[in-house]
Amino acid sequence: MRAEALKGHLDALLLATLADGPRHGYAIKEALRVDSGGEFDLPTGTVYPALHRLERGGLIGSSWSVVAGRKRRSYELTDAGRRALDTGRADWRQFALAVTGVLEGRACPAPTG
Amino acid sequence: MSAPDRTGGTRSALPEQDDATALIDGYLVDLASALACQKSVRSAIVSEIRDGLMEAVSDYKALGMRNREAVEAAIGEFGEPTTVAESFRPEFVARRARSTAIALIASGPLVGIAWIAGAFFTGLPPVRDHLTGPWLALPLVGLAIVIAAPSSVVAVVTTGRAGIRLPLPPSLPARAVSIARVAALAADVTLLLMLAFYALTTTASRSLLPLVPAIVISLTRVLLASRHPLRSRRSGRLAVGSG
């Protein structure tokens, strides 16, 4: 799947890969690929700059460590990032319901709460 | 996925391990050269990409590939270094816009206080009398400040969390900070020119020493504000072997 198709959802997807704890850039890239069943095999030039952008926005933080003799930068969610992920999940559920309602010809149930 | 052959045939006699290491180092040197950013940022990105490459190599080797094959596959997966470097450019522009805007906001009051205090202790006409001669241009400084201050705030806000949450044009922070830079430059140059004209034309004997701090601060801002925000760093060098 092309990165452009994820426009508007990439930030939430990246945040979701960090929901269970810190990960480094390549592990995030791999988590996106594996968890999507191979659909989201995104280029390096998409994932790493997006992580830097999320860090600038305060949604994730990063720290450096040394692993196998080389520097490693790991990312983790901030409190603001967790809130943004919750919002992203809720927005996606509502969006998916609405799209399914239209494409499948079924009425979209009103959002609860 | 096929990786570009960077060995040019001359390294074929090297042991496979050295050859693979040279491939990765060559890739990272190319990446470092193509990254148009500060040295510290460039070093961090190269370290991060190196770690990612090495992780990818490990993954490919776990699939049964030989070392050289795994390195080529990892490099192929990461893509051309120039493409990777170019993808970071919007982030560099945003970070530079943010730091420039913060510097303008922080230095604005300093410039104002330095000039007002200098004018007060020097007893310049704008403090003593109504505006005459070169000081008639003083309202231009006020206009520049009215433009620079909100533009800087817009640049800071749009390069923060709001820039991620709101559907803003990607070029907005860079445009806002460009306007702020030009306005701040205009304010400083106007102040310096007014003082220069006054010093050259006045008949009053008055020491301008109290204005020296203001002159130094404004000249520094003029020099910094007139620098291009993102220069290409084709000659960027980096110790890629340091991990």
Image (cartoon, rainbow, N blue to C red):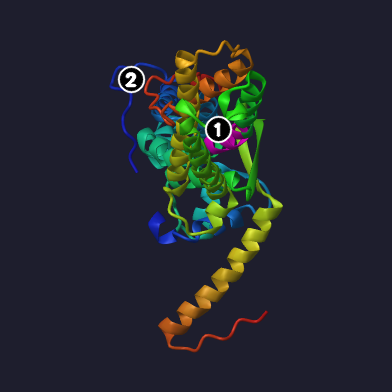
Tag count in the figure? 2
Work out whether residue B3 or residue B175 is closer to the camera in this orientation and state it: B175
Please tell me whether the stretch drawn in magenta is mainly helix, strand or loop: helix
Magenta part of the chain: B100-108
Q: CA distance from mark 1 to mark 2?
A: 81 Å
Work out whether residue A11 or residue B134 is closer to the camera in this orientation and state it: B134
- The x and y percentages for residue B154 are 53, 48
Q: Is residue B195 left or right of residue B212?
A: left
Q: Please tell me whether mark 2 sits on a helix, a strand or a loop.
A: loop
Query: Which badge, 1 or 2, comes first in the chain's sequence?
Result: 2
- The x and y percentages for residue B160 are 58, 48
| Mark number displayed over residue A79 | none
Residue holding disc 2:
B12
Residue holding disc 1:
B130
Q: Tell me which chain the residue with mark 1 is part of.
A: B
Q: Tell me which chain the residue with mark 2 is part of.
A: B
Q: Please tell me whether mark 1 sits on a helix, a strand or a loop.
A: loop
Residue B55 visible within the image: no
Type of amino acid under label 2: Ser
Where residue B125 sits, quadrant-wise, is top right
Type of amino acid under label 1: His
Q: Residue at x 55, y 32 (%)?
A: B130
Circle 1: is it few (<14), some (14-19), or many (20+) Cα within 10 Å?
Answer: few
- The x and y percentages for residue A96 are 51, 74
